[in-house]
Amino acid sequence: MGYNIAIVGATGNVGREMLNILHERQFPADTVVPLASRRSVGKEVSFGDKRLKVRALEDFDFSTVDIALFSAGSKVSEDFGPKAGKQGCVVIDNSSRFRMDPDVPLVVPEVNAEAVAGFHKRNILANPNCSTAQMVVALKPLHDEATIKRVVVATYQSTSGAGKDAMDELFGQTRAIYVNDPIEPKRFTKQIAFNVIPHIDVFMDDGSTKEEWKMVVETKKILDAKINVTATCVRVPVFVGHSEAVNVEFAKPLSVERARSVLREAPGVMVVDKREPGGYVTPVECVGDYATFVSRIRADTTVKHGLSLWVVSDNLRKGAALNAVQIAEVLINRYLKKKAA
């Protein structure tokens, strides 16, 4: 006997990826219900070789499903997440709405799977920000080995992190440049084609953006509150795949060779680190893969114990859909076993 699963936001980029990953990983689902707003009712989405018809979120009875994967934005999560939880459904939410709620575990299974045990407080579990998720997967084994004191990260985030309209804007602007049409930024504040924009989410009082703030506070909640983090988050003209230049200062010595060895043994990490042209991973190569790739591992001699890394991952997968499904797998394997028996 399997589980009944709902996908909230099933017509979006991440929702469709959730459906793909549930099927790829052979998640024990008896039924899968795609949900979206009323304007999407009747549309079809793929689940393996099946076509599923989208149902309306607004009047859905969550007591009929065991787990709901939410990827429809913070407002939808705020309105329907607690409702679903009170009806006995466990919500795994991909928005930022509940990440810093002290009663909601913020989980990356390779890093803090044990935190899933706290789901019962509100029947809600939170997915971290996409850029945080891949970074902490790479940092966790290094932290266990030598204790991280400080992280300085610059991100190179793809347009898919801002949704389908953002990807369309990159495509449209790129085409417009080649045919000499005017460029009109809509989803972004400036031209994204052949450009980079150091601005993701809203600005905060201290001059940082909310995306940068998320990386700081989420890393502390997931990995270790004692770690100091500073981030600069940049949108780049890439369709899928986030990249990060990560500089790490440790409390203890950690050689490049030992770091490489530790990372090679770490869950969810793939090391591709050859000191030659092409001996590293770029966003184009990570698309469709489950792994978080680590390259360019080298010493930072400006601090006592420092390393620099290049970290790349498919943001629609590990940064969102895959992480949500992995949380669901931890949930059923450790806490809802009786249903699968």
Image: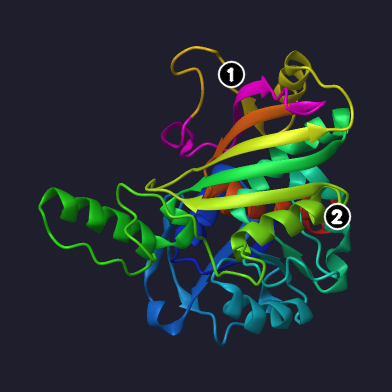
- Percent x, y of residue 17: 50, 53
- Amino acid at dot 2: Ala
Seen in the picture, residue 292 relative to 315 is either above or below; the reply is above
Mark 2, other Cα within 10 Å: few <14 / some 14–19 / many ≥20: some
- Amino acid at dot 1: Asp
Q: Which residues are magenta?
A: 282-306
Circle 2 is placed at which residue position?
115
Residue 210 vs residue 113, the one in the foreground: 210
Circle 1 is placed at which residue position?
273
Seen in the picture, residue 58 relative to 125 is either above or below; the reply is below
Label 1 element class:
loop
Residue 307 on the magenta segment: no
Residue 89 vs residue 337, the one in the foreground: 89
- Percent x, y of residue 283: 46, 37
- Quadrant, the N terminus: bottom right
Label 2 element class:
helix
- Percent x, y of residue 187: 37, 67
> Residue, x 48% and y 43% (percent of image)?
241
